[in-house]
Amino acid sequence: MSVRAVRIDAADNVAVVVADVEAGGRVRLDDESELTATQPVPRGNKVALTAIAPGEPVIRYGEEIGVAPADIAAGDHVHTHNMGGRK
């Protein structure tokens, strides 16, 4: 079974999960693509859709909401612990 995630804009590199996801759980987007969560992601939190390198923006709703201070892998939980302020 997979958990649905909401991606609002095609430019988004994160999506918001609608239910808790365990590490190794599947996350499904509206376009039916899926990825595997590398870490637990609590409901309402963000999961990385692609790898985000240090210094690259984190994009949600088509807008930059922060910057990756270190590598973020696709499937990682994205929150204040691994996302810095805007450039």
Image: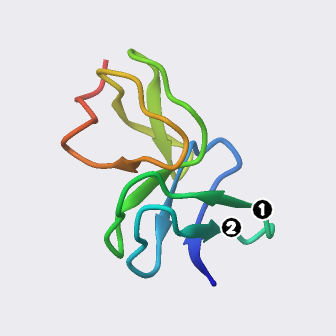
- Left or right placement of residue 73 versus residue 1 in this view: left
Q: Secondary structure at mark 2?
A: loop
Q: Which mark is residue 29?
A: 2
- Left or right placement of residue 59 versus residue 10 in this view: left
Answer above or below: position of 8 versus 71. below
The residue at the point 42 percent across, 32 percent down is 72
Look at label 1 and name its amino acid. Answer: Ser
Badge 2 crowding class, 10 Å Cα cut-off, few under 14, some 14 to 19, many 20 or more, is some
Q: Secondary structure at mark 1?
A: loop
Question: How far apart, in angstroms, are the residues tagged by discs 1 and 2?
Answer: 6 Å
Q: Position of residue 61 (x, y in %)?
A: 52, 53
Look at label 2 and name its amino acid. Answer: Leu
In this figure, what is the number of numbered marks? 2
| Label 1 close to label 2 by CB (< 8 Å) | yes
The residue at the point 50 percent across, 58 percent down is 37
- Left or right placement of residue 67 versus residue 37 in this view: left
Q: Position of residue 12 (x, y in %)?
A: 59, 45
Answer above or below: position of 87 versus 79. above
Badge 1 crowding class, 10 Å Cα cut-off, few under 14, some 14 to 19, many 20 or more, is few
Q: Which of these two is toward me, 11 or 78?
A: 78
Would you identify the image quadrant in which residue 80 lies? Answer: top left
Would you identify the image quadrant in which residue 51 lies? Answer: top right
Q: Which mark is residue 63?
A: none
Q: Which residue is mark 1?
A: 33
Q: Position of residue 74 (x, y in %)?
A: 55, 42
Answer above or below: position of 63 versus 39. above
Q: Which of these two is toward me, 45 or 71?
A: 71
The residue at the point 38 percent across, 55 percent down is 39
